[in-house]
Structures are given as structure tokens and as C-alpha cells.
């Protein structure tokens, strides 16, 4: 894997709204697309829940449910995200705030087209920060049973090929290949509708879902191979002879969005679905991290060049990973000789919760100062919300410190932080920082 820069990041010029019934639940939902700052990525905001929790379109949040892609963070879920994310990938829109008043996006036309049209109507504007392109330099493959996805080098850009093979002997395979750019995406991919097979009627009935299915937003392939409208069961006219393979490409592009980078290369997918798509994205990012190697980690000396803190108040020993999309992981090895154990508490030493939060604030400071282009400024913590202390941190524990930028502007930043010991959460919080010039201190 190699990284390069081919373009600037992009967002929309003004907010826009879409509403309609969700495909599975049948509930009326509204989604508002709003401009976002560089390096924000795609952030889904659940406005129907207390505190408006945020779920980012990140690989670690990516999952699948019945016939759809899901994003999940803690207990908050966003269902059926693939068509909106596909529109963002196809039109090269990188940063959006997506406010949703339910747990599932509206089905609209059963394809990315209406999402894409709304983005174009809102207008697309270039931002001043580069967008990373990840070039596939050597073959990378994932497979499951008869399904597979292979990524290969290509001379330029991203080309996707999809081979859709049917279990019905009398149905020929559909094959579709396309070079991805905004113009070809709108013409050749975005209008391709979702589809299912005749046995889906029974599956949907058993699960009590499908209330948002209409004759216009889906196609059903019957046992005789004929495409029909799902409710009236009348013959359906396809938009393309290989519409189903094109829709699979639309889904695949949407599932690539959580990678947070543009991909350059050739991707060949055979029978793949959402779960295998997610596995491919995870493999791509693992290969990238492996190629980066230990030289990208920050030791204590490099941390001291970034942060103004010194012993005994420097509470970060090492940075393990630092991602361009606004995420960082560091560690603090909690020794029995820590100065604070002398008085907190001598007979039962516990790392004070406020010092755990200070360690997290320092890691967030490295993130803001190192990766989000605030070099020359100091990140000053101004508030903490939703603070939770989950378990005691004891001598001998290794505290893993994670921070993820939710919103970054020129003067302030909002960062979600979490400290863990093994698989257990020790503390977590939402922090806000002011970005202050060093000369002003």
C-alpha cells in the first residue's frame, strides 16, 4: 500500500434535508445533510436520542445486519447507511454532518440517486486540506465460501468490476465494470435499485420488516427469473440490463466509505455482500498500518517535543497509532512508584480519576497538534461532559488511551476520549479544547 494526494477534501455548500419511510421499519424518518469542517469525515447524529449521540463512519463502527450495512458505537445504531455513503464516495464528498431522527435512513428510491441529487443541489465545495489516496500496490484478497473481493494495482484511479452469479440455473450471470468518477457514478451506478429474491417475502414476514418497500424502490427476482414489482408483483422494467450487478457496485462503494481515504486500484468482486465488503476494508487498513511500521509511533522524546508537559505531569508514555482521519491511541504504564500513589491511597493505591482524564487530554492534545494542522498552537482543555469512571486503575495496569476528533475548527475542537485496561473501560468523556497561539500564553 502507498499513500498519495490527488485532490482536496470536499463538503457541501449548504444544508439540505431528505425524508421518507425506512425500508425495513417502515417508519417515517428525516435526514439532514450539513457542511462539516475538514477531517470531520461522515458523522451520523441521532437527534431523536438524549444528548444527540454521534456515530462516525469508521471501520471500527462498521457492521452488518439483515441485508444492510450498520454503523454502531456503544449502544447507538444507524441502519441502512450504504446508499448515502455510496453517494458520498461516488461524488467525492468527504465531510458531512448527517442528522437523523431515527435508527434507519430513509429508503427513498431504493438506490443512492436521491441522496446524490440532494448533494449536487446543495453544491459541493473544495476545502483547504488534502484528501489521502491509498494506492493498492500489491494484490489483496478476502473470501468467504464462493464470494471474494480482490484488490489489484492499476495505472490510475479506481476501477470496480462486479460478477453477480445466481443460484438459478436459467439465470445468466451479470457482469459490470466501471471507472469511478462523479460523472459516471451519476449516470451508471446511482440509479440502480436494490433487489431481492422471491424467498425474501417469507423472510421479511418472519422478521416483521419491510414496511418501507414500494413498487418503485425495489425489484424482486422470481423463481422463473422474471423481475417483478414487490407489492403488485407486476412485471418490472429494469433500468439497465445488468441493474443488479450495478447495485452491488453501489453498495460496495458505500461500504468502502469508512476507510476514510480514496482508493486507487482495481477491485474485482464476485458474489460479495456487505459483510465481505467490510472485511475487505478492514484488510486494506491493516495492510496500510503494517506498511507504516514502528517509525510512525511516537516515543516519550517525540511526545515531549509536541506537548509542553514534563514530569511528574506528563502522563503519556508512548503513542501507538496516529491516524490522518482524526484518531489516536497511546499508552500510560501505571507504575507502583507513581508520585500520586503516595497519598491516593497508601493502603489501597488507585490512580485518581482526574489524572486519567488528564492523560486522555494529553493524548487528545497530541492528536490536535500533530495531525489536525494546528502546529504552532496549544490545545487548552476548556470543558468535559459525559464523564464516566468505570473501574479503578491500579499499580501494574497499562492504560490504553484513545481519542477521536468529532469536530475541529480553527479555534476549538471536540474530542471523544476513552481509557481502557485490557478490554475494560476505565473512564470516558467528551472534551472540548480551545486552540491558542503559544505567544498568547
Image (cartoon, rainbow, N blue to C red):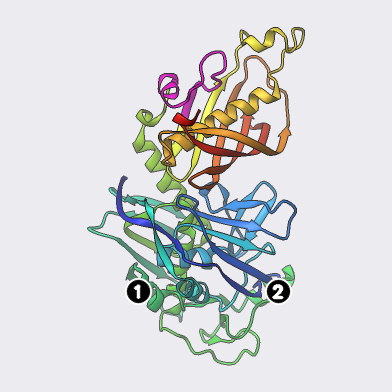
The magenta stretch is 300-320
Q: Nearer the viewer, residue 216 or 150?
A: 216
Image quadrant in which you'd find residue 323: top left
Identify the residue at image location x=70%, y=25%.
353
Q: Which mark is residue 345?
A: none
Identify the residue at image location x=74%, y=7%.
346
In the picture, the quarter occupied by the N terminus is top left
Position of 181 with respect to 309 (left or right) is left
The image shows residue 149, relative to residue 295, as above or below, that is below
Image quadrant in which you'd find residue 390: top right
Measuring from the top left, give residue 7's x and y in whole percent: 32, 56
Identify the residue at image location x=44%, y=54%.
143
Measuring from the top left, give residue 437's x and y in whole percent: 46, 34
The answer to whether residue 6 of the structure is visible from this angle is: yes
Residue farthest to the front, as pictured: 440
The image shows residue 269, relative to residue 218, as above or below, that is above
Residue at which label 2 appears: 26
The answer to whether residue 145 of the structure is visible from this angle is: no
The image shows residue 233, relative to residue 59, as above or below, that is below
Sequence-first disc among 1 and 2: 2
Residue at which label 1 appears: 183
Q: CA distance from mark 1 to mark 2?
A: 32 Å
1 and 2 marks in contact (CB < 8 Å): no
Q: Secondary structure at mark 1?
A: helix
Image quadrant in which you'd find residue 15: bottom right
Amino acid at each position: 500500500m502507498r499513500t498519495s494526494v490527488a485532490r482536496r477534501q470536499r463538503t457541501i455548500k449548504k444544508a439540505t434535508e431528505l425524508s421518507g419511510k425506512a425500508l425495513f421499519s417502515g417508519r417515517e424518518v428525516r435526514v439532514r445533510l450539513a457542511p462539516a469542517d475538514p477531517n470531520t469525515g461522515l458523522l451520523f447524529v441521532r437527534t431523536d436520542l438524549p444528548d444527540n449521540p454521534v456515530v462516525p463512519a469508521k471501520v471500527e463502527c462498521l457492521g452488518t445486519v439483515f441485508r444492510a450495512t450498520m454503523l454502531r458505537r456503544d449502544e447507538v445504531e444507524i441502519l441502512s447507511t450504504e446508499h448515502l455513503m455510496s453517494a458520498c464516495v461516488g461524488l467525492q464528498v468527504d465531510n458531512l454532518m448527517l442528522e437523523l431522527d431515527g435508527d434507519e435512513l430513509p429508503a427513498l428510491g431504493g438506490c443512492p440517486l436521491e441522496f446524490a441529487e440532494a448533494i449536487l443541489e446543495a453544491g459541493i465545495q473544495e476545502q483547504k486540506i488534502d484528501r489521502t489516496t491509498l494506492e493498492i500496490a500489491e494484490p489483496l484478497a478476502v473470501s468467504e465460501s464462493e464470494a471474494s473481493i480482490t484488490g489489484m494495482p492499476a495505472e490510475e484511479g479506481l476501477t470496480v468490476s462486479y460478477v453477480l452469479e445466481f443460484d438459478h440455473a436459467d439465470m445468466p450471470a451479470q457482469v459490470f465494470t466501471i471507472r469511478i468518477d462523479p460523472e459516471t457514478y451519476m449516470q451508471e451506478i446511482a440509479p440502480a435499485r436494490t433487489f431481492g429474491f422471491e424467498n425474501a417475502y417469507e423472510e421479511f414476514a418472519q422478521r416483521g420488516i419491510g414496511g418501507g418497500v414500494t413498487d418503485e424502490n425495489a425489484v424482486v427476482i422470481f423463481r422463473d427469473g422474471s423481475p417483478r414489482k414487490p407489492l403488485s408483483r407486476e412485471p418490472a422494467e429494469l433500468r439497465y440490463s445488468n441493474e443488479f450487478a450495478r447495485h452491488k457496485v453501489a453498495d460496495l462503494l458505500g461500504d468502502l466509505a469508512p476507510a476514510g481515504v480514496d482508493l486507487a486500484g482495481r477491485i474485482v468482486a464476485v458474489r460479495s455482500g456487505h459483510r465481505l465488503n467490510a472485511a475487505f476494508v478492514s484488510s486494506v487498513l491493516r495492510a496500510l498500518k503494517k506498511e507504516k511500521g514502528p517509525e510512525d509511533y511516537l516515543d516519550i522524546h517525540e511526545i515531549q517535543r509536541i506537548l509542553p508537559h514534563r514530569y511528574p505531569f506528563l502522563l503519556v508514555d508512548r503513542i501507538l497509532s496516529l491516524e490522518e482521519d482524526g484518531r489516536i491511541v497511546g499508552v500510560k504504564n501505571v507504575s507502583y512508584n507513581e508520585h500520586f500513589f503516595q497519598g491516593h491511597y497508601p493502603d489501597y493505591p488507585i490512580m485518581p480519576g482526574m489524572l486519567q482524564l488528564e492523560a486522555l487530554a494529553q493524548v487528545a492534545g497530541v492528536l490536535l497538534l500533530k495531525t489536525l494542522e494546528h502546529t504552532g498552537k496549544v490545545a487548552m482543555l476548556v470543558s468535559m461532559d459525559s464523564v464516566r469512571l468505570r473501574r479503578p486503575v491500579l499499580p501494574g495496569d497499562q492504560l490504553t488511551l484513545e481519542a477521536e476528533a468529532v469536530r475541529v475548527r480553527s479555534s476549538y475542537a471536540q474530542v471523544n476520549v476513552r481509557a481502557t485496561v485490557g478490554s475494560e473501560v476505565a473512564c470516558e468523556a467528551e472534551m472540548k479544547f480551545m486552540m491558542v497561539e503559544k505567544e498568547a500564553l
